[in-house]
Amino acid sequence: MNKAVFYHAGCPVCVNAEERITEIVDRSRYDVEIVHLGENKGRIAEAEAAGVKSVPALVLNSDVLHINHGASMAEVKG
Amino acid sequence: MNKAVFYHAGCPVCVNAEERITEIVDRSRYDVEIVHLGENKGRIAEAEAAGVKSVPALVLNSDVLHINHGASMAEVKG
């Protein structure tokens, strides 16, 4: 099973992107973990190390797909 | 079958996003059409009407997911 991580911060743009992404992904091949960085600030470093510059973002192996723009990582850190 | 349209302009950012999106989408539920706007300038108006501001972008029904940033629509029109 492939792993994908969707990082977001609860913003409207994030919620919309999350709905669309979880809707289109082939769940028989991908396990999608949803991480709310506002509620899991301990995982911000991991997201940044993966290359996440803004949320919402989907990390697939070594690639980061920034999907629309909800908030920058600086804003997420608050 | 649901319809999704992936608009791009052949740029490296576009190619990478196309690979990831076509990889994760559940093809048993989604029919993904790939449209190269540089080669199909006649479809630029349709993309703009759907809300596409930059490429690569994935249009799902009434939602537009701008994925990373390859080029603005102004650049695509060139």
Image (cartoon, coloured by chain):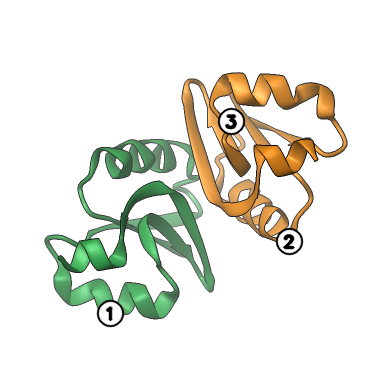
Chain colours: A orange, B green
Q: CA distance from mark 1 to mark 3?
A: 34 Å
In front: mark 1 or mark 3? 1
Measured as percent of width and height from the top left, residue A51 is found at 53, 26
Type of the residue with mark 1: Ala
- Are discs 2 and 1 less than 8 Å apart at CB? no
Residue drawn at (39%, 42%), measured in percent from left and top?
B22
- How busy is the neighbourhood of tag 2: few (under 14 within 10 Å), some, or many (20 plus)? few
On screen, residue A47 above or below B24: above
Q: CA distance from mark 2 to mark 1?
A: 27 Å
Measured as percent of width and height from the top left, residue B35 is found at 25, 60
Residue drawn at (39%, 80%), measured in percent from left and top?
B49
On screen, residue A43 above or below A18: above
Measured as percent of width and height from the top left, residue A14 is found at 69, 53
Kindly state the secondary structure of the residue where label 3 is placed: strand
Kindly state the secondary structure of the residue where label 1 is placed: helix
Type of the residue with mark 3: Tyr
Pinpoint the chain carrying mark 2.
A
Instruction: Give the numbered dot on residue B45.
Output: 1
Q: Mark 2 highlights which residue? A: A12
Q: Mark 3 highlights which residue? A: A30
In front: mark 3 or mark 2? 2
Whichever of callouts 3 and 2 sits on the residue coming sooner in the sequence is 2
Measured as percent of width and height from the top left, residue A15 is found at 72, 55
Work out which quarter of the rendered image holds the C terminus of chain B and state it.
Answer: bottom left
Q: CA distance from mark 3 to mark 2?
A: 24 Å
Type of the residue with mark 2: Pro
Report if residue A51 is visible in the image.
yes
Residue drawn at (22%, 54%), measured in percent from left and top?
B9
Specify the quadrant of the image occupied by residue A29: top right
Nearer to me, A67 or B18: A67
Q: How many marks?
A: 3
The residue at the far right in this view is: A39
